[in-house]
Image: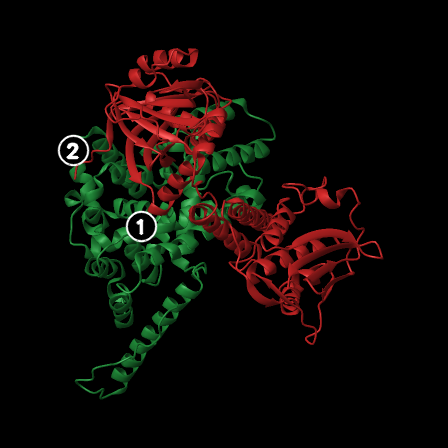
Chain colours: A red, B green
Amino acid sequence: MIGNNALVQPIIADISAEGRLIRADGPVLRLHLLAGGEDGGFLAVPALKALASASHKLQMRFARAVTVADDDEDILLWVETELIENIVRLKILGWQPERKPDEIASRDKQLDQIDGIISLVFNQQLLLIAVSGDGGNDSFRIGNSAGNIFSGLSDGNKSLLEAIHQHLPIQTGNVEIGSGQIYSAAAVPKYDRQNKFIGFEFQLQPSANSLQATDTKLENPIVLFGNQLETALRQPLGRIIANAETIGSKLQGPIRDSYATYAKDIADAARHLVALVDDLGDLEAIERPGFSTAKDIIELGDIARRVAGLLALKAADHSINILAPLETQQVPATAEFRRVLQIMINLVSNAIRYAPYGTQVTISISQNEANSQICVSDEGNGIEPDDREKIFNKFERLGRSGDGGSGLGLYISRRLARTMAGNLVADQTEQGGAKFTLTLPR
Amino acid sequence: MVSLDYKMELKLENPPNNNVDLVSAASYFARDALSQCVDVSAMAFPTGHMRPTEEMLSSVSGTLRNLVLGIENVILEREADLQLSCPVSWNMLMQSGFLRDHALIEFALAMFANVRLNAHITERGNTRLFDQLPAQLLVNNNPLLSSAAQSLLTSETQIRRSPELAYQQLNSELLHQITWRIVAVLQVINGEKNAAHVARTKAFLANHDEATSLRSAARKIVYFLQKSNDGDLFQPAETGIAIFVAALAASTGLDHDHVLRLADNHSSAPLALMLRASGVSRESAMETICLFRGFDLTPLEISYVERHFDVLAISDAKDILNLWSVERVRQLSSIEMDNGGL
């Protein structure tokens, strides 16, 4: 039962009273840079920072096991602190990598793919041994040397090669790789447990110019907000909402009222993010070439009543009454049921959000020889004539903020309406309120 | 949810033939029923506190008194022959509520649990101290392990023989907190600020080495032993209570004191839950539960573990423990904030 987590020499990091990383052995420096820290800046590894801060604040020594995040794994460290004048010395005596749970590792990977980040791993001899998120550059061939890959003559490449040979962390600007492709590059040297240099890990991101060039070549754009973000964002956000609501509703026991309010704020913020992710997902879908909708025979009165039912609680929160068409009123149309429902939920939600408390939102339906129409009108202040077209622009908020909207809802709704051979326009009621009319073919 | 489908059965090979036997059988069943109620309530109300016994109250009071006395001795530089049985700051500390700190009481209760669990191992474990893991590690060729084992054994000896040095077992945050409170009370008693007290306190705190405390040494041993041998660490008769508890704490994410208190609970359910969450086999868990509960273990508890241990998923056991841990942290932090933090 003899352990093998112990280091022959402890890894040392010195932290100033303000929390700056004054000096650090390679492995800690790597973690610090990986966590977004800067050379000589504030220590960016949260668990180590907390330990150093407590040690300095209390002027006492600590000996604890702490977990820090690395690229593909968590590392359980055994850390002991020492006080040397006004400096806290962290002595890392044990370094025990632990695999991240699969779910988290897969999420990290997906986010990297989404970001378009390319990872290159070089060994001690600076030969490429692993590539992920390959952007299709021929230079990223396993076995190719760093010298060959970064052989461009630009200033960025020169300073990068110097840093590689000196085993220094790299935070350079643009570098040129292969046939003129420009990437922004960052890299950290890798060390083993004995503090011996074992290679470099690079992260490259195509620069803006390269991205534009690449986008034009792509016949099948990558699906960003579909399945991939389900696990990467929607699920974690769902859990945040559930946990925050559980805490906020005091189901697990009494807590201070202020904490309950914070928990509700967290849930609201997460809900806003979910809505944004949904909007971006829709945006991506409708802007994809070849996007089309089904041509079902639907009944607009039915949709109006469903929407009124779905949003009744939300409306009640604002003391707003939703008036839907009677069961006897029926207007057929040709469109995709769930897309029309989506547009209507968006329109009625907006009306509830912006109409004054205690007013009424009316959903009405009508038809003529060619088209069917469904209107949502409120008793608010209406929309200025100049803004009635502008509000259908992408991310247009008309100067509003902090109300939970993303500025995409109406843009998406109009795009959907037009895809279904219809249209969505904004107008004003006789009383001055806002009126949105969705027209669809019969 | 706890299943209550267990049917109480008693094999009456020799039917009770007098009142004594009847009373004995009745009390036996009463104990079973009580145990079942405790198990159910432990599951349904995991944060509920058990009613303190006289023994527990006395132990907590004694530990607190020893903590204050030991720290006072350092601050006031008392000579050994002048040491008092009751600290001078005791009354004011009690009246001010400084000693009602939740974390401090938790520490004292954990010390009480530690003594009780150790006693069970000594009485029923059938192992001698020098057969246990810490003694073996003293000659380990890994200096980190041998020095940690030495610290652990030193701490255990101190706890038994020099209870006024119990402050050395406090974590840095708690020691800092209580020490400065004692300094403040001494200043009030003396009616003036004493620079020598302050200087000695600062030096005392700076010299305190958390790594030599019992829990830290045990955790360090668990850390530096190979993970593949984790199973060996869940046998308290072999490892001693400190390493066993540290191994449970490391695998479940619970605090060392929390594990001690749960292991010494009047129900075997929390201990079974921790062992399940740590991936210990049912047979080994049963052995550990019998070691700690001994004759208090009722047939119902045995049946409960036999039936439900393997059925409960390890992840579910971890989830339950996680809830308990969160609740405890919340209690401690809210009380710390009420007291204005450090």
- A145 displayed left or right of B57: left
Instruction: Answer above or below: position of A410 versus B9.
Output: above
Residue identifier under label 1 = B115
Measured along the vertical axis of the image, is residue A157 above or below residue A297?
above
The quadrant of the picture occupied by the C terminus of chain A is: bottom right
Few, some or many residues within 10 Å of mark 1 (<14, 14–19, 20+)? some
The vertical placement of A9 against B224, above or below, is above
Which residue position is annotated with label 2?
Answer: B140
Residue B252: x and y, percent? 34, 49
| Labelled disc at residue B137 | none
Q: Chain of mark 1?
A: B
Q: Quadrant of the N terminus of chain A?
A: top left
Amino acid under disc 1:
Val
Q: Residue furthest front?
A: A369
Marks 2 and 1: CB-CB under 8 Å?
no
Between the residue at mark 2 and the residue at mark 1, the CA separation in whole angstroms equals 27 Å
Residue at image position (22%, 42%) is B227
